[in-house]
Amino acid sequence: MTDFDARLARIRRSHWFRHETDAEHEARVEAAEATAGWYFRQATEPQREAYRRSLADLMGMTAPRDERAREAALAAYEASTAAAGNLMLDTIDELLRTGEISEELSDRWEALCRQTDRARAA
């Protein structure tokens, strides 16, 4: 289990409301994950497209060199989206704790999206 997965599992378990059923909790978690996922996708579109292009270039190729290229593309994607992934976990955590995204967290997403826009323009 990766650190990301472990943190997500901890967040999912840590925010039960007092009289919440399992189904209600799961629905709340899924809604928080969907909202945070939307922000993540907006902030990481260029990285996702670069990763998809890399995989498309390697489609149908099975040589060890091609497998290493796939692994390198995945590693580059994960490294380039690590900040957005951590911010996504912070967003899920906050949504489950408070039911909304704070202005501070929204500002962090906006700053990350501005970086993405600058990278896209370059």
Image (cartoon, rainbow, N blue to C red):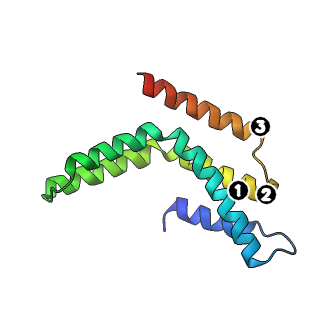
Total residue callouts: 3
Residue at (74, 70) in percent of width and height: 25
Residue, disc 1 = 93
Q: Locate residue 61: give its quadrant.
A: bottom left
Q: Locate residue 19: give its quadrant.
A: bottom right
Is 36 located above or below residue 4 in the figure? above
| Spatial CA span between label 3 and label 2 | 15 Å
Q: Secondary structure at mark 1?
A: helix
Residue 11 visible at all: no
Q: Secondary structure at mark 3?
A: helix
Residue 26 locus on image (x, y percent): 69, 71
Q: Looking at the image, tell me whether mark 3 or mark 2 is earlier in sequence order.
A: 2
Kind of residue at disc 3: Glu
91 or 22: nearer the viewer: 22
Q: Residues within 10 Å of mark 2 (few under 14, many from 20)?
A: some
Q: Looking at the image, tell me whether mark 1 or mark 3 is earlier in sequence order.
A: 1
Residue, disc 2 = 97
| Spatial CA span between label 1 and label 3 | 15 Å
Is 98 located above or below residue 105 in the figure? below
For the residues labelled 1 and 2, say whether their Cβ atoms are less than 8 Å apart.
Answer: yes
Q: Residue furthest left?
A: 63
Q: Secondary structure at mark 2?
A: helix
Kind of residue at disc 1: Asp
Kind of residue at disc 2: Arg
Residue at (41, 40) in percent of width and height: 47
Image disc number at residue 103:
3
Residue 105 locus on image (x, y percent): 71, 40
